[in-house]
Amino acid sequence: MAQEIEHYLMEQFENGLDGNDKSSISKIPRYSQFQAIKTVLKEIFGSSSLVDQQLRDKLYNLNNALTECRILSRKHGFYSPEELLTINRIRMELKQIKKDLKTIIGNSNRGSNRSSDEQHVSNVDSISSKDRELLRWTTRSVDASKVYGFDDDVLSMEKLLVQQESRDRFKAIGVVGREGIGKTTLCQLVFNKPEVKDNFLPRIWVCMARDPDGHEDEDLKVAIVKR
């Protein structure tokens, strides 16, 4: 049952990468990088012993990155500076995913013993926490014309933010859910609404750390301001 999830995510990745719309495939940013990762994944899925929770996380991240790139592929004309920053972030993220996948294969070839697992953890830990966070940073840019299904949620959040009776009070709105369902996209849409722009000046987009406990040696509010 557990491996069915990984196989489903792999199928989702392949369909997204080589779907029916062949004309748009070549326009997907980092397409060759995605294809190289697909080749490595094929090797991993050839051995059921390598399909585990660790791989599932990689597939979730991979599908998220592919979704972003497919959205960017529909753009006509030149990329904006923020879009170029997003593409570069994805390039770094894909590079790390491919490296981790090759490590999984390498550990298996050496018997996947405890020693090799500890070595893998050591290799991952060698990447600074700051570098890992950079791979996950997002921007406030979004093409609202290419996003569907968020209208009611955007309207609700906008009303909560700009309603008059709460203007003099601090307000925080939490958006929760599993990876890939559109939490960041929803926030981007609300962030760029004209009425929100009129009521909040300045507006600041800050990427939070994936693991808040990673800043135990530093006040979280200070870490946010530094960004």
Image (tube, rainbow, N blue to C red):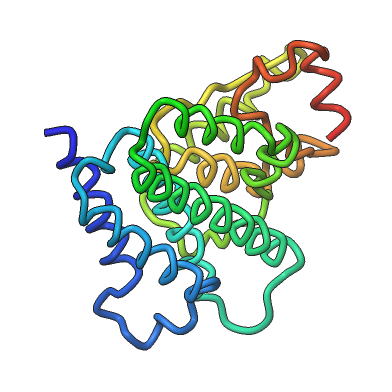
- Image quadrant containing the C terminus: top right
Q: Which residue is depicted at the point 36% across and 36% down? A: 112
Q: Is 178 on the left-hand or right-hand side of 10?
A: right
Residue 189, given in percent of the width and then of the height, sits at 57, 48
Q: Which residue is depicted at the point 29% across and 53% down? A: 44
- Image quadrant containing the N terminus: top left
Q: Is 218 on the left-hand or right-hand side of 104?
A: right
Q: Which residue is nearer to you in this view: 113 or 174?
A: 113
Total marks drawn?
Answer: 0
Q: Is 9 on the left-hand or right-hand side of 4?
A: right
Depicted 177 relative to depicted 169: above or below: below
Q: Which residue is nearer to you in this view: 151 or 25?
A: 25
Residue 195 in view: yes
Q: Which residue is depicted at the point 54% across and 33% down? A: 119
Residue 166 position by quadrant: top right
Q: Which residue is nearer to you in this view: 52 or 178?
A: 52
Residue 114, given in percent of the width and then of the height, sits at 41, 25
Residue 51, given in percent of the width and then of the height, sits at 26, 42
Q: Is 81 on the left-hand or right-hand side of 35?
A: right
Q: Which residue is depicted at the point 61% across and 38% down? A: 123
Residue 120, given in percent of the width and then of the height, sits at 52, 36
Residue 151 in view: no
Extreme-bottom residue of the structure: 23
